[in-house]
């Protein structure tokens, strides 16, 4: 009987439709699941074979095309050298003998753009995927497969696209011992001990996933840098990764520790104006390019959080960055210099420090320097106003730095789609030089013809089978790539694409999923940092609430520094009567942020200290409004749980169960955030809760006593 039941279960598992078979999430948005029969029949009539060149990137594109067809249609495309009938897919550049006679308008697409067009070659109806360079063909193939995954017609195609930013990179905060700082998806995927002798096949899948969304670079090492990666034996390991990534258009970058000339070179100084130091870096860069001819360049974190830098020698950020830039320039390399700095002495307002240090240096950086600026002036909070450096350095290339990993938004277990956060920052109007000068437009407009542009994302990738620690965190990796390609893209269409590619083409499934995603980040803001509060997380690991923390060595490490709640009111006065951080923005923006009547309520307590009785837009006192926002956040998570429960049986059980369990964790931790925050702020304000809102489950001392010293991702 047992054998019969086991056999029956095996038959049932085989008979289950692909949409409900168990999946791990490893395939990301490149699942290539079998299509419905009508779409199989339709595509099978339209695509019969393909023709391509035998170069590494074109081979990668052809292999992806075959993989997609095998998964979605169940048959392998045949690679032929010529067009032998209707239905060929022709891959190549404008110089291809089959494509050149078509006279396609490729010139305006640049080195990475592509064109997908229905055409006729030798009297046969074909689909041409063409570009100026091979990597554009690869991007076009991924777009073509996306059309199939989303059940779009393949006849009469006329699609062209090109990235708006040149440098589109992931920043891995991965240490050489495979520990990932702020990582919530296991160990680093870089198994340095086995490199260069063994190249994990996962490296190729990593490259495929990145190429599919247009990412063209990866910084392999932590910004809190270790100089050892620059040693010759480590460069051979880096070379092995670069060789794997190259066919997919991805360059490797490394973080450079500013003090490496001392630690590796035996010099007595790392002063960027010392000729010996400059010569050491030039020799090291030349060595790297001998090993990796298409090395992308360096990312540097200097004079921030204890890292060495030019200020140690009374030199400016520009003088430090330019030394690296001069060494990289002959090889076409880029230097990314982080603007995330805050001084060791007690500052008047951490919000102001990056602007104060960098804005006076506008125009003093070399042409191949990108100053990498976080989306907000503090540190990847659930909500921040846009960084005042955007629009304030018109002669300096600035690149955006987003954090894909959710250091401050509940780690891997909280569902928080960050596309909405990033759209909010990118569409913010800087009013510099004029109205309509959004952050997105500034990023995409070179400061002079040919100057670098870019966007960086702190990766959420690890060794977990699903790559990112949770199924929904994959969406943030995907959204980053899409926005790095086009900063003017919108979060909802990106969410819809990701949901379709990841969970299937059924609107009854994708509709609720997109709805959950679009409201998820706002839910986190509500139960963590409503009305413009920020940096209230527990110290160090940033896991859970800690608004009461006030005993850390530096003022700006303490949550009380940011909310400034007292018996009279709450909020940080950054107006002209306070720290005047608003003065770093354009006058139009400063006038809005600095005026209690005009400031967006989402930034109210970021810029203003108000009495507990202050009337918000709802007519309620700010104290009552805070309580309502906390409860609204918890209720939003409960609603997501209900929406997800309604999808049971419509998607594969393994991924469904994982998300169900993570939402349960999020529900409990949202309540923890709500209760602990209210308990603390009530102890300060001495005000009663509004009618109908429950008191915290425990007293304040209970929440203060909660310790989580082993929460993942904290720096070591």
Image (cartoon, helix red, strand yellow):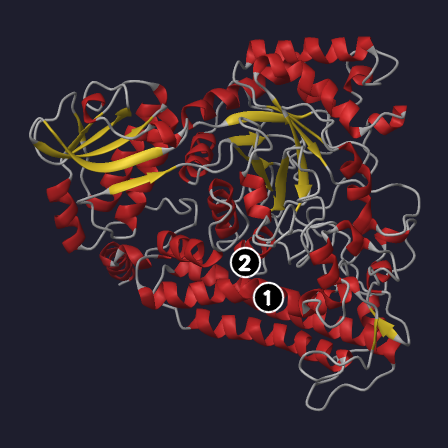
Q: Do the residues labelled 1 and 2 touch (CB within 8 Å)?
A: yes
Is residue 371 in sight in this rendering?
Answer: yes
Give 66 or 216, whichever is nearer the viewer: 216
Q: Residue at x 70, y 24 (%)?
A: 256
Q: Which residue is drawn at 20% across and 18% down?
A: 97
Category of crowding for the residue at label 2, using alpha-carbon neighbours closer than 10 angstroms: few (below 14), some (14–19), many (at least 20)? many
In the displayed structure image, the side of residue 461 where residue 80 appears, left or right? left
Query: Which of the marked residues, 1 or 2, is nearer the chain's N terminus?
Result: 2
Q: In which quarter of the image is the N terminus?
A: bottom left
Give 520 or 366, whichever is nearer the viewer: 366
Residue at mark 1? 522
Q: Spot the residue most to the bottom.
A: 691
Give 178 or 541, whichever is nearer the viewer: 541
Q: In this picture, is 20 found above or below 478?
A: below
Secondary structure, mark 1, is: helix
Q: Residue at x 63, y 54 (%)?
A: 411
In the displayed structure image, the side of residue 24 where residue 50 appears, left or right? left
Residue 155 locus on image (x, y percent) = 17, 45
Question: In the image, which disc is placed on residue 146?
Answer: none
Q: How far apart are marks 1 and 2 (CA)?
A: 9 Å
Q: Residue at x 55, y 61 (%)?
A: 415
In the displayed structure image, the side of residue 622 where residue 75 appears, left or right? left
Q: In this picture, is 170 found above or below 528?
A: above
Residue 349 locus on image (x, y percent) = 85, 52
Residue 339 locus on image (x, y percent) = 73, 38
Category of crowding for the residue at label 1, using alpha-carbon neighbours closer than 10 angstroms: few (below 14), some (14–19), many (at least 20)? many
Question: In the image, which disc is placed on residue 420?
Answer: 2
Give 226 or 42, whichever is nearer the viewer: 42
Please identify the quarter of the rendering in which residue 623 is found: bottom right
Q: Quadrant of the C terminus?
A: top right
């Amino acid at each position: 009987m047992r054998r019969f039941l086991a056999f029956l279960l095996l038959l049932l598992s085989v008979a289950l439709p692909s949409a409900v078979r168990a999946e791990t999430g490893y395939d990301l948005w490149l699942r290539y699941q079998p299509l419905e029969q009508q779409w199989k029949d339709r595509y099978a009539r339209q695509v019969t074979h393909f023709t391509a060149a035998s170069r590494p990137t074109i081979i990668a594109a052809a292999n992806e095309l075959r993989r997609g067809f095998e998964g979605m249609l169940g048959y392998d495309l045949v690679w032929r050298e010529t067009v032998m009938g209707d239905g060929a897919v022709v891959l190549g550049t404008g110089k291809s003998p089959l494509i050149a006679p078509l006279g396609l308008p490729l010139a305006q697409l640049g080195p990475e753009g592509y064109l997908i067009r229905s055409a006729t070659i030798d009297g046969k109806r074909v689909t041409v995927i063409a570009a100026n360079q091979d990597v554009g063909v690869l991007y076009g193939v991924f777009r073509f497969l996306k059309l199939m995954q989303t059940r779009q017609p393949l006849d009469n195609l006329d699609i062209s696209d090109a990235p708006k930013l040149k440098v589109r990179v992931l920043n891995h905060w991965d240490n050489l011992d495979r520990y990932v700082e702020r990582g919530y998806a296991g160990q680093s995927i870089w198994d340095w001990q086995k490199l260069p002798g063994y190249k994990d096949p996962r490296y190729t899948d990593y490259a495929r996933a990145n190429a599919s969304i247009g990412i063209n670079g990866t910084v392999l090492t932590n910004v809190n840098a270790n100089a050892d990666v620059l040693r010759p034996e480590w460069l051979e390991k880096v070379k092995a990764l670069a060789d794997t990534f190259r066919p997919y258009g991805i360059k490797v970058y490394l973080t450079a520790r500013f003090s490496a000339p001392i630690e590796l070179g035996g010099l007595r100084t790392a002063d960027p104006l010392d000729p010996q130091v400059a010569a050491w870096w030039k020799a090291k860069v030349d060595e790297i390019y001998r090993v990796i001819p298409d090395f992308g360049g360096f990312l540097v974190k200097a004079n921030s959080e204890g890292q060495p830098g030019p200020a140690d020698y009374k030199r400016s950020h520009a003088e430090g960055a330019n030394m690296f830039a001069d060494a990289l320039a002959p090889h076409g390399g880029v230097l990314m210099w982080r603007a995330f700095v805050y001084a060791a002495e007690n500052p008047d307002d951490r919000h102001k420090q990056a602007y104060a240090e960098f804005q006076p240096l506008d125009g003093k950086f070399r042409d191949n320097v990108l100053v990498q600026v976080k989306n907000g002036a503090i540190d990847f909070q659930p909500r921040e106003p846009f960084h005042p450096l955007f629009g304030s350095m018109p002669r300096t290339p600035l690149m955006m730095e987003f954090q894909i990993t959710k250091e401050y938004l509940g780690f891997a277990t909280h569902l928080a789609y960050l596309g909405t956060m990033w759209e909010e920052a990118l569409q913010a109007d800087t009013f510099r030089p004029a109205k309509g000068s959004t952050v997105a437009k500034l990023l995409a407009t070179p400061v002079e013809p040919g100057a670098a542009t870019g966007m960086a994302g702190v990766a959420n990738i690890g060794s977990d089978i699903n790559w990112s620690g949770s199924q929904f965190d994959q969406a943030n990796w995907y959204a980053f790539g899409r926005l790095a390609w086009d900063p003017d893209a919108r979060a909802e269409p990106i969410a819809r694409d990701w949901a379709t590619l990841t969970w299937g083409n059924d609107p009854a499934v994708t509709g609720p999923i997109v709805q959950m995603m679009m409201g998820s980040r706002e839910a986190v803001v509500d139960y963590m940092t409503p009305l413009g509060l920020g940096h209230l997380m527990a110290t160090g690991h940033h896991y859970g609430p800690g608004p009461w923390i006030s005993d850390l060595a530096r003022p700006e490490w303490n949550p009380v520094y940011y909310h400034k709640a007292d018996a009279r009111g709450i909020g940080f006065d950054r107006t002209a009567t306070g720290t005047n951080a608003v003065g770093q923005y354009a006058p139009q923006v400063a006038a809005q942020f600095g005026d209690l009547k005009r400031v967006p309520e989402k930034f109210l307590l970021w810029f203003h200290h108000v009495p507990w009785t202050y009337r918000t837009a709802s007519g309620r006192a700010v104290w009552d409004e805070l309580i309502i926002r906390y409860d609204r956040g918890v209720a939003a998570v409960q609603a997501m749980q209900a929406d997800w429960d309604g999808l049971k049986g419509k998607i594969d059980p393994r991924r469904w169960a994982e998300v169900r369990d993570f939402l349960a964790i999020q529900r409990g931790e949202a309540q923890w955030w709500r209760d602990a925050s209210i308990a603390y702020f009530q102890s300060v304000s001495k005000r009663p809760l509004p009618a109908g809102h429950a008191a915290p489950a425990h007293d304040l001392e209970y929440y203060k006593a909660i310790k989580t010293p082993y929460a993942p991702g904290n720096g070591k």
